[in-house]
Image (cartoon, helix red, strand yellow):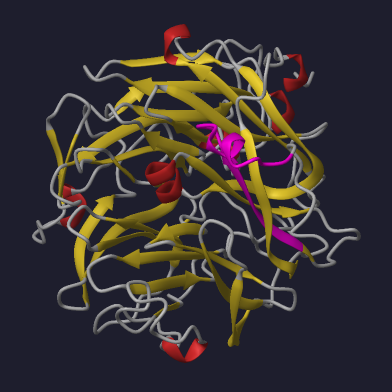
Amino acid sequence: MLFLAAALPAPAEPPAAWIRSSVVDPAALNVAKGPFGTCFNGQTFQQEAVLTFNGYQYAAYYAHGGALCLARRKLDDGLWQALRFEDYRIAHEDVHNVAVLGICAGDGTIHLAYDHHVSPLHYRRSVPGLALRPDEIGWSTNAFGPTTSRLWSQPLSGVTYPQFCSTPAGDLLLLYRLGASGDGDWHLAEYAGRRGTWADLGMLFTRRGAYETSRSRCAYPNPVRCGPDGRLHVTWCWRERPANGVRDLRTNHDLCYAYSDDCGRTWKDNGGQPVASLSDATDAWASAIGVGTPGTVVRPTRYLWGQMNTTTECVDAAGRVHVINWQQRQDAEAASADLNTWRYYYYWRDTDGAWHTHELPFVGRKPQIVVDEKENAYVLYGESDSRNYHNVDPGWKMVLVKAARAGEWKDWRRLWSSEETFVGEPLIDPVRWRQTGVISCYAQEKPGAPGAPSALRVIDFDVAGAAHQRGAGAASTSGD
């Protein structure tokens, strides 16, 4: 039975102010039917899809017809200016193959990676300075190089789920999988702004090891996030390739955690013990994190039971790590691959390293979480009568809820819900949130007919209440 978030108590007065809903592109790409959904623009493994840098906000996506696009706007309320790369188009229905962007603060380059699901690398980057001097350098496709499969001398192939992460030193990391679902290794590369070159740091997660009847697997990391002290945090689950032939979300298991204090070169477990040294080229598999690496499982979850991979993670101002898993109840009567039977579980790592968890009183599609300086948590999620979205996406209403640390993040209150219906998953701009306390949500409206184009939006919420002082309007996503 679906638990509707409408049962959450309504606030006495609106604590979240709508700033504006902007249209990135009125005609973004949808497909009529796909094995994993119908929307390329808005998937939780799309890190990042929307990103703020130097007073501008950027969004990567595909337009109707399949062309790769990158748009930008000047904050707070500039119009979106879209670049359309006509030399690269999506011509299939696999929504794993999202477009992601990263920005290197060191030299102002903008990086794009796109169209991957065990594929050759598809990557291009801008000229230096484009993000540092946006009013001086022309905003055009001529400011970007061609698509390439090379970060260094050798081309990369078998790439899936590339995600960018900026480092405190002003460089840029790229985490990516080589290999297939249940049979892939994860590698980390670093772009040094001072040199303008990529370097291979090494393997972070290995497929090797034995677990139950499985002899191969892959990690599914949530977004790598940087804490206030510069520490990198990563959480993940494992997906097995068991001998019994099960090939669905029941093979995901456990919540795992590691952190790095040297921009990804070495990693430690929850207790501070070394678990990975990426620079050890003598045996990359032995020096990477595997399914049997001690100290990395912080919350075991049942194997062959039902658990989503790649959801959401954030790090708050105190350095606490927050994660929401979407999974079958551990005390359910049976395993389930039916997403409608699953619940949200909230996990957080306290400042002393202790992990806590509880089931949330609402559930929907893959969520997003952020936590403000007053230790209030905000969750954006998609509420729908059906949460199964493979083949055809039924769509969802966007909901924003809030809870306080004083109540151990159990006193959830509904702040806002959309009138419009969306497809895919909501994504949040982590930099704008960290710098201004504004939640910028990237989401695409459900099309009027299967496969028709629809509007890709960025919806802004000022949860600090500054928009009240600016005289913002009512909470609605209508308008441009």
Quarter the N terminus occupies: top right
Residue lying at the far top of the rendered structure:
407
Where residue 452 sits, quadrant-wise, is bottom right
Where residue 382 sits, quadrant-wise, is top right
Residue 11 lies, in percent from the top left, at: 67, 16
For the question of whether residue 221 can be seen, the reply is no
Residue lying at the far right of the rendered structure:
449
Residue 236 lies, in percent from the top left, at: 39, 38
Residue at position x 80%, y 60% from top? 33
In the displayed structure, 396 sits above or below 464; it is: below
In the displayed structure, 243 sits above or below 62; it is: above
Q: Is residue 442 magenta?
A: no
For the question of whether residue 39 can be seen, the reply is yes
Of residues 48 and 358, which is closer to you in this image? 48
Residue at position x 74%, y 28% from top? 340
Residue at position x 58%, y 17% from top? 360
Q: Is residue 472 magenta?
A: yes
In the displayed structure, 144 sits above or below 418; it is: below
Residue at position x 12%, y 30% from top? 273
Of residues 36 and 229, which is closer to you in this image? 229
Quarter the C terminus occupies: bottom right
Of residues 47 and 431, which is closer to you in this image? 431
Please state if 51 lies on the left or on the right of 63 as rendered: left
Of residues 397 and 239, which is closer to you in this image? 397
**Numbered disc total:** 0
Residue 363 lies, in percent from the top left, at: 67, 25
What span is colored magenta in the figure?
455-473
Residue 6 lies, in percent from the top left, at: 77, 20
